[in-house]
Amino acid sequence: GQSLEQPSEVTAVEGAIVQINCTYQTSGFYGLSWYQQHDGGAPTFLSYNGLDGLEETGRFSSFLSRSDSYGYLLLQELQMKDSASYFCAVWRDDKIIFGKGTRLHILP
Amino acid sequence: DADVTQTPRNRITKTGKRIMLECSQTKGHDRMYWYRQDPGLGLRLIYYSFDVKDINKGEISDGYSVSRQAQAKFSLSLESAIPNQTALYFCATSDRLAGRTDTQYFGPGTRLTVL
């Protein structure tokens, strides 16, 4: 089957760094995407890794290792506004498959 | 103005009623999608359409139907609503020219409650 596994919740402190992992049991996909969703809001696109390695966009970075079936989203200099749910996703067979999401709690 | 709009934003209905959720987009994208979101289950694909004449079932299409009236409009129908269809429903679009990223652009969502 196809599935993406993420921790259901992660807690970190404001100003710190946090990593949200995504492991997958699917193959033949083109790349790994990450989306952010605030409470009451819609998911919004954050980043995409089409190749293995690290992609950096400001305070956010994303990493993919196809050989390890693993990726992660790294958030630096955490701010309270980063409190949200984060979803990894892959595009396969003309469809997007989402993980169940990781709820990020940030403590002041 | 929002690029992807959904109507209604909230709806409460009774078991057995027919419900239609509508989605419109001004992004000019050819691909449109309907998802439902339940707590702890993430986003699950109901139906998707790559153009007006193309409709495909997603992961959880039973109990739902769709209509792609135009490139910019994609509606979702619940022919006979049941309580376990209570969820948050999102419409999304993507652009085939985006290639393999298929970045999804989501509407604001419709919160549906079936009593």
Image (cartoon, grey):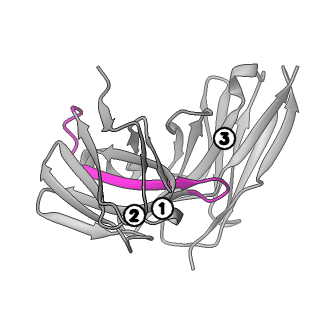
Pointer 1 chain: B
Q: Is residue A95 visible?
A: no
Amino acid on which the number 2 mark rests in the picture: Ala
Is the N terminus of chain A in the top left, top right, bottom left or bottom right quadrant?
bottom right
Amino acid on which the number 1 mark rests in the picture: Gln
Residue B82 at what x, y percent from top left?
45, 66
Q: Are marks 1 and 2 in contact (CB under 8 Å)?
A: yes
Per the rendering, the mark at residue A85 is: 3
Q: Nearer the viewer, residue A26 or A1?
A: A1
SS label for mark 2: loop
Q: Are marks 1 and 2 on the same chain?
A: yes
**Which segment did they paint magenta?**
B26-42
Q: Is residue A25 visible?
A: yes
Pointer 3 chain: A
Q: Residue furthest bottom?
A: A1
* Picture residue at 44% right of the left edge, 49% below the top: B89
Q: Is disc 2 surrounded by few (<14), some (14 to 19) or many (20+) residues within 10 Å?
A: many
Residue A25 at what x, y percent from top left?
63, 72
SS label for mark 1: helix
Q: Are marks 3 and 2 in contact (CB under 8 Å)?
A: no
Residue A48 at what x, y percent from top left?
52, 44
Q: CA distance from mark 1 to mark 3?
A: 22 Å
